[in-house]
Image (cartoon, rainbow, N blue to C red):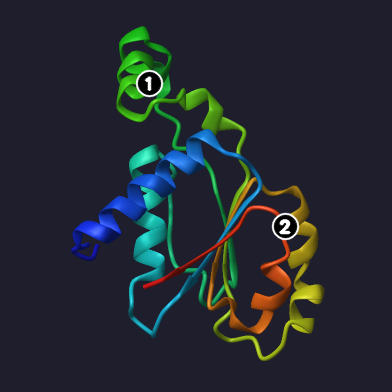
Amino acid sequence: MLNWNQEQQEIIKKSQLRVGRGPYPWVLCLQGELGAGKTSFVKSVLEPLGFEDVSSPTYALHQTYKLKTLGSDENSPDFRNLFQSQWGFSRDKLLHLKVDHWDLYRLRSGSELVDLGFWEQLAVSQIVFVEWPQIILKDLSLVPGFDLISL
C-alpha cells in the first residue's frame, strides 16, 4: 500500500462512507500516471470494509468484488455493533452490493467496451471503479453518480 497524504486519506474515508451509505449507483473514475496508485486507492477503500481479493484488473480488464465471509463472528452482536460504531452503517448493507472494478488502460476506443459488456454491467452495479477512464470520460460524466479523482 502507498503512504497516503492527509488529503488522500480523507478522500479514502469519504469513499468508504459512500460505499456503505450510498447513494447508488456510484461510478468513481480514477485518473493518474502509471504507478500513481489507482489500484492501491481501490484496495484502501474496499479492504478495510471487508471486501476480498481486491487486485488490479489490468490484464483481466474487469473484477467483481464480494465481502469476505467471516463465519460465526459476523453474526455476533459484538461484531455487528463494533462494525456499526466504526463505520456508521451496517455490514449487512454491504452484503448485496455489486462492486465492479475496470481498468481501461489497454483499450484503444470506447467501442471495445460494448463487446466486453461494460455498459450492461454498469446498469446493474451499485459501485463501479474505473481506472484510465479517458476513452469514455465524456460518456461516463453523464452517468448518475459519476465522480472523478486524480491521483
Quadrant (top left, top right, bottom left, bottom right) of the C terminus:
bottom left
**Residue at the spot 40% in from the left edge and 66% down from the top edge:** 39
At horizontal 66% and vertical 47% (from top left) the residue drawn is 25
The single residue placed furthest to the bottom in the displayed view is 108
- Badge 2 density bin: few <14, some 14–19, many ≥20, Cα 10 Å: some
* Cβ atoms at labels 1 and 2 below 8 Å apart: no
Residue 88 place in picture, x, y as percent: 39, 25
Q: Position of residue 144 (x, y in %)?
A: 70, 54
Mark 1 crowd level (few <14, some 14–19, many ≥20, 10 Å Cα): some
The image shows residue 63, relative to residue 21, as above or below, that is below
Label 2 SS = helix
Q: Quadrant of residue 139?
A: bottom right
Query: Is tag 1's residue or tag 2's residue first in the polypeptide sequence?
Result: 1
Residue 67's disc is none
6 relative position to 107: left or right: left
Amino acid type of the residue that numbered disc 2 sits on in the rendered structure: Leu
Q: Quadrant of the N terminus?
A: bottom left
Rendering coords of residue 106 (x, y %):
58, 86
Relative depth, front residue between 6 and 55: 6
Q: Which mark is residue 84?
A: 1
Disc 1 residue type (three-letter): Gln
Marks 1 and 2, how far apart at CA: 28 Å
Disc 1 secondary structure class: helix
Q: Residue at x 30, y 19 (%)?
A: 82
Q: Residue at x 79, y 83 (%)?
A: 111
Q: Which mark is residue 122?
A: 2
